[in-house]
Image (tube, helix red, strand yellow):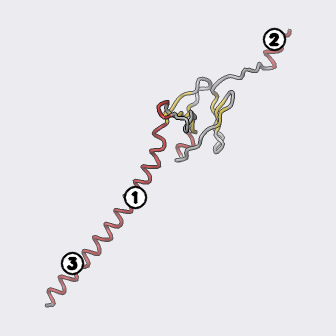
Protein backbone atom coordinates (compact mmCIF):
# COMPACT_ATOMS: atom_id res chain seq x y z
CA UNK A 1 0.00 0.00 0.00
CA UNK A 2 2.84 2.38 0.81
CA UNK A 3 4.30 1.75 -2.62
CA UNK A 4 1.01 2.71 -4.27
CA UNK A 5 0.71 5.90 -2.19
CA UNK A 6 4.35 6.72 -2.90
CA UNK A 7 3.80 6.24 -6.64
CA UNK A 8 0.62 8.32 -6.49
CA UNK A 9 2.49 11.13 -4.71
CA UNK A 10 5.24 11.08 -7.35
CA UNK A 11 2.65 11.10 -10.13
CA UNK A 12 0.84 14.06 -8.56
CA UNK A 13 4.13 15.90 -8.16
CA UNK A 14 5.06 15.23 -11.79
CA UNK A 15 1.59 16.36 -12.89
CA UNK A 16 1.90 19.57 -10.92
CA UNK A 17 5.31 20.23 -12.50
CA UNK A 18 3.91 19.59 -15.98
CA UNK A 19 0.98 21.94 -15.30
CA UNK A 20 3.42 24.66 -14.21
CA UNK A 21 5.50 24.17 -17.37
CA UNK A 22 2.32 24.26 -19.47
CA UNK A 23 1.25 27.52 -17.83
CA UNK A 24 4.70 29.07 -18.42
CA UNK A 25 4.69 27.98 -22.08
CA UNK A 26 1.19 29.36 -22.62
CA UNK A 27 2.25 32.67 -21.06
CA UNK A 28 5.37 32.84 -23.25
CA UNK A 29 3.27 31.97 -26.32
CA UNK A 30 0.81 34.79 -25.52
CA UNK A 31 3.67 37.29 -25.12
CA UNK A 32 5.23 36.24 -28.44
CA UNK A 33 1.88 36.51 -30.24
CA UNK A 34 1.38 40.00 -28.79
CA UNK A 35 4.87 41.00 -29.92
CA UNK A 36 4.24 39.61 -33.41
CA UNK A 37 0.92 41.43 -33.67
CA UNK A 38 2.58 44.68 -32.61
CA UNK A 39 5.28 44.23 -35.28
CA UNK A 40 2.71 43.41 -37.98
CA UNK A 41 1.48 47.02 -37.77
CA UNK A 42 4.59 48.01 -39.70
CA UNK A 43 4.13 45.54 -42.57
CA UNK A 44 2.03 48.09 -44.48
CA UNK A 45 4.95 50.53 -44.72
CA UNK A 46 7.92 50.72 -47.06
CA UNK A 47 11.21 52.57 -46.50
CA UNK A 48 11.62 55.38 -49.02
CA UNK A 49 14.34 57.96 -49.54
CA UNK A 50 13.08 61.53 -49.71
CA UNK A 51 13.73 63.27 -53.04
CA UNK A 52 15.61 66.09 -51.29
CA UNK A 53 18.04 65.74 -48.43
CA UNK A 54 18.76 62.02 -48.65
CA UNK A 55 16.75 61.03 -45.57
CA UNK A 56 14.42 58.06 -45.22
CA UNK A 57 10.82 57.81 -44.10
CA UNK A 58 8.38 54.92 -43.91
CA UNK A 59 5.50 55.49 -46.33
CA UNK A 60 2.22 53.62 -46.38
CA UNK A 61 2.27 51.17 -49.28
CA UNK A 62 0.06 52.30 -52.16
CA UNK A 63 -2.04 49.12 -52.01
CA UNK A 64 -2.89 49.93 -48.37
CA UNK A 65 -4.27 53.40 -49.08
CA UNK A 66 -8.03 53.65 -48.62
CA UNK A 67 -10.47 56.51 -47.93
CA UNK A 68 -10.27 55.60 -44.24
CA UNK A 69 -6.49 55.28 -44.36
CA UNK A 70 -5.04 58.07 -46.51
CA UNK A 71 -1.45 58.22 -47.73
CA UNK A 72 0.96 59.17 -44.95
CA UNK A 73 4.42 58.48 -43.61
CA UNK A 74 5.61 57.30 -40.21
CA UNK A 75 8.82 58.14 -38.39
CA UNK A 76 11.63 55.63 -38.96
CA UNK A 77 13.35 56.51 -35.67
CA UNK A 78 10.21 55.99 -33.60
CA UNK A 79 9.56 52.75 -35.47
CA UNK A 80 12.88 51.42 -34.13
CA UNK A 81 11.43 51.97 -30.64
CA UNK A 82 8.24 50.13 -31.61
CA UNK A 83 6.14 53.30 -31.91
CA UNK A 84 3.95 54.04 -34.93
CA UNK A 85 3.99 57.84 -35.14
CA UNK A 86 2.42 59.50 -38.19
CA UNK A 87 4.64 62.32 -39.42
CA UNK A 88 3.15 65.72 -40.21
CA UNK A 89 3.81 67.09 -43.67
CA UNK A 90 4.02 70.67 -44.81
CA UNK A 91 5.19 72.26 -48.07
CA UNK A 92 8.81 71.30 -47.59
CA UNK A 93 9.26 68.52 -45.04
CA UNK A 94 7.90 65.66 -42.98
CA UNK A 95 8.37 65.97 -39.22
CA UNK A 96 7.78 63.76 -36.20
CA UNK A 97 6.02 65.33 -33.23
CA UNK A 98 7.42 62.70 -30.86
CA UNK A 99 11.17 62.71 -31.54
CA UNK A 100 11.49 65.82 -33.78
CA UNK A 101 13.00 63.86 -36.69
CA UNK A 102 12.62 65.85 -39.91
CA UNK A 103 13.02 64.90 -43.56
CA UNK A 104 13.02 67.43 -46.38
CA UNK A 105 10.79 66.32 -49.28
CA UNK A 106 10.92 69.42 -51.51
CA UNK A 107 12.66 72.75 -51.77
CA UNK A 108 10.75 75.82 -50.69
CA UNK A 109 8.98 77.73 -53.44
CA UNK A 110 10.06 80.94 -51.73
CA UNK A 111 13.26 82.47 -52.97
CA UNK A 112 16.02 83.24 -50.53
CA UNK A 113 17.04 86.82 -49.79
CA UNK A 114 20.26 86.20 -51.68
CA UNK A 115 18.33 85.03 -54.76
CA UNK A 116 16.05 88.06 -54.60
CA UNK A 117 19.07 90.38 -54.21
CA UNK A 118 20.71 88.86 -57.27
CA UNK A 119 17.55 89.45 -59.30
CA UNK A 120 17.30 93.11 -58.21
CA UNK A 121 20.76 94.11 -58.69
Between discs 3 and 1, the one toward the N terminus = 3
Number of numbered tags placed on the structure image: 3
Q: Which mark is residue 118?
A: 2
Q: Is residue 102 above or below residue 110?
A: below
Most extreme residue toward the bottom is 1
Mark 2 or 1, closer to the camera: 1
Extreme residue toward the front, this view? 67
Task: Give the x, y percent position of residue 90.
Answer: 68, 31
| Mark 2 Cα shell of 10 Å, populated few (<14), some (14-19), many (≥20) | few
**Relative to 53, does residue 22 appear above or below in the rendering?**
below
Local secondary structure at mark 1: helix
On the image, the x and y values in percent for residue 75 come to 58, 39
Whichever of callouts 2 and 3 sits on the residue coming sooner in the sequence is 3
Q: CA distance from mark 3 to mark 1?
A: 28 Å
Number of other residues with Cα within 10 Å of mark 3, as a class: few under 14, some 14 to 19, many 20 or more: few
Give residue 51's position: percent from left, percent from top.
59, 23
Compared to 16, does 29 lie above or below? Answer: above
The residue mark sitting in front, 2 or 3, is 3
Residue at point 52%, 29% (across, down):
48
Q: What's the distance in space between the residues labelled 2 and 3, CA to CA?
A: 93 Å
Within 10 Å of the Cα at label 1, are there few (<14), some (14-19), or many (20+) other Cα atoms?
Answer: few
Marks 3 and 2: in contact by CB < 8 Å?
A: no
> Label 1, on which residue?
30
Residue 11, which numbered label?
3
**In the rendered image, which quarter contains the C terminus?**
top right
Q: CA distance from mark 2 to mark 1?
A: 66 Å
35 lies left or right of 16: right
Identify the element where label 2 is drawn: helix
Amino acid sequence: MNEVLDALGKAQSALLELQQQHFELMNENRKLKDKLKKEERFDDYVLRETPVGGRYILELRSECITPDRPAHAICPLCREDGRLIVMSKNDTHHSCSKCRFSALHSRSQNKSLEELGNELG
